[in-house]
Image: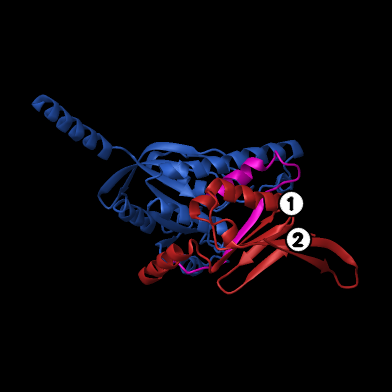
Chain colours: A red, B blue
Amino acid sequence: MVKKKKVVRKKGKKAVKELSIQFLPYSEIRLLDSDERIKKILNVVLGNQILFLQGRLKPLEESRLIGDTMAMIGHVKDFKGIELAVIGGNGTSGFFNKMKKGFVNALSGGDLGAVTIIGPASVVKDIKRNPKKIELLLNK
Amino acid sequence: MVIKIFKNFFQRIFFSIFKNKKDIRLGFYGPPNAGKTSLANRICKDFTGEEIGSVSKIPHETRNVQFKEKVEISYKGKSMTFKMVDTPGISTKIDYEDFLKYRVKKKEAKNRAKEATQGIIESIKWLDDMDMVVIVLDSSQNPYNQVNITIIGNLAARNIPVLIVANKTDLKKSDVKKIEAAFPDYETIGLSAKKGNNLEEFYESIFKLTKKIK
């Protein structure tokens, strides 16, 4: 597991906030079942870190992540939920793209061309995305 | 032995007749404040004279799954009966402080937030029980939201037919083409549930979508 730490500085001021980003390669979750994957992800988020996950979760895991997140709001102090975005990937449009995606995913075990960004809502205010760019807006 | 075979045969026919007569479960899914209840209300009012739930400018007004049974939609001489299922808006975060901006009292805001989280869990659970789903999106908002993608991905994984509604076309910022571009694999209908614009095309698409139910 690679762990990166980045210090965010504002103009004319000293370091105001420490932002911690954790990168999780797909190999770290490949052999885990859905329960363990979600638990691992939520542990990172609860540690107030932003997670960059190589690949993406299955749709059912994504909805499960949202459900588990909701179940924790109100039970974990100051936890307000998560911000979630997936960038890149093999694409889903068109018959041949779908075939290609299925074939590549079967070989690699996941959509490794994608990156999933998950951050605690108390740290990440919003993740704005369109087909060409992604913006990570942080809370003050 | 012969009697048993006949019994099984008639049982199968009996069940298949009643299975076909079962109402089609039509779910309304989407992010908060996209107009799911407004659209469901419009349909229910048109065909039953009654509404399904209350609407508000405050997000997460719908915090429980709401139903309307036996809604018979008639369009161009055809008629089909649906069970309308209006679900709470799905989001990845809930902060009670967001409700305070709408002059909701702190205690009420906290309660609303708690109910909203439970409503989202309930919405997700109901995904398994839908025959077809209308995803309602606010056409004045950016559609590239992971919640929208997650809902659609879940429905695709379950082989549930989907129609996308680009709601609020009465707003100046409305951009139906942007929603079409975001989800090119699905049919998108632009309409205004509030004003009742373009509902004819919506009903036609709903009838077409019923053919895709597996």
Kindly identify which chain the residue marked by label 1 belongs to: A
Give the residue at x 55% y 51%. A32
Q: Residues within 10 Å of mark 2 (few under 14, many from 20)?
A: some
Q: Residue at x 56, y 45 (%)?
A: A35
Residue A132 vs residue A15: left or right? left
Horizontally, residue B130 falls left or right of residue A64, namely: left
Which residue position holds label 2? A20
Number of numbered discs overlaid on the protein picture: 2
Magenta residues span A63-92
The reply to whether the C-beta atoms of the residues labelled 1 and 2 are less than 8 Å apart is yes
Q: B3 and A35: which one is in front? A: A35
- Above or below residue A94? Residue A43 is above
Label 1 secondary element: loop
Q: Is mark 2 on a helix, strand or loop?
A: strand
Residue type, numbered disc 1: Gly
Q: Which residue is drawn at 62% across and 44% down?
A: A70
| Residue bearing the label numbered 1 | A47
User: Relative to B128, is A29 above or below?
Assistant: below
Instruction: Depth check: give the residue in front, A97 or B73.
Output: A97
Q: Name the residue: 60% across, 44% down.
A: A68
Residue A69 lies in the magenta stretch = yes
- Identity of the amino acid at label 2? Ser
